[in-house]
Image: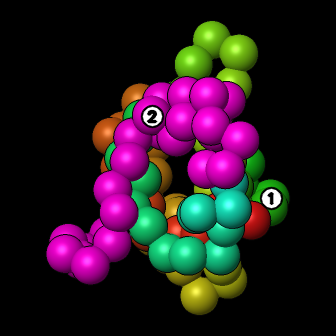
Amino acid sequence: AKTDPGLSRLTALGLVGMLKADKNAESRYKNKPFLIDGTVAQLDEEHSIVTLTGSKVASVRCFFAAAARADFAQLKVGQKITVKGTLS
């Protein structure tokens, strides 16, 4: 993802922790774009879903739109990536 100075930036681990600790965090981020940094833990090629490492008990799943399938195809497990998306 390109750098966008107007967006919040979180790590996958930070997002998992924030959502667990702050009951209002979900409403602050829901349907608003932000950047998330993480390491690819798993790829679901059939559904274009990337799972980013979060914590031992939770992770972050990123759903890629059809228009971004070429980007998805470039990903490898273990790769560090930044994804621009929304919490839904």
Q: Which residues are magenta?
A: 1-25
Residue assigned mark 2: 14
85 to 76, vertically: above or below: below
Across and down, in percent, residue 12 comes to: 48, 38
Residue 30 in view here: yes
**The C terminus - image quarter:** bottom right
Q: Is residue 64 left or right of residue 4?
A: right
Is residue 37 located in the magenta-colored stretch of the structure?
A: no
In which quarter of the view is residue 64 placed?
bottom right
Residue 51 in view here: no
Amino acid tagged 1: Glu
1 to 60, vertically: above or below: below
In which quarter of the view is residue 23 placed?
top right
Callout 2 secondary element: helix
Q: Residue at (80%, 61%) from the top-left corner? A: 47
Q: Residue furthest right?
A: 46
Across and down, in percent, residue 70 comes to: 50, 76
Tag nearer the camera, 1 or 2: 2
Q: Earlier in the sequence, mark 1 or mark 2?
A: 2
**The N terminus - image quarter:** bottom left
Q: Residue at (53%, 69%) from the top-left corner? A: 85
Residue assigned mark 1: 46
31 to 72, vertically: above or below: below
In which quarter of the view is residue 84 placed?
bottom left
Amino acid tagged 2: Gly
Q: Is residue 55 left or right of residue 23?
A: left
Q: Residue at (62%, 28%) from the top-left corner? A: 21
Asked whether the residues under the numbered discs 1 and 2 touch, taking CB atoms below 8 Å apart as contact, a structural biologist would say no
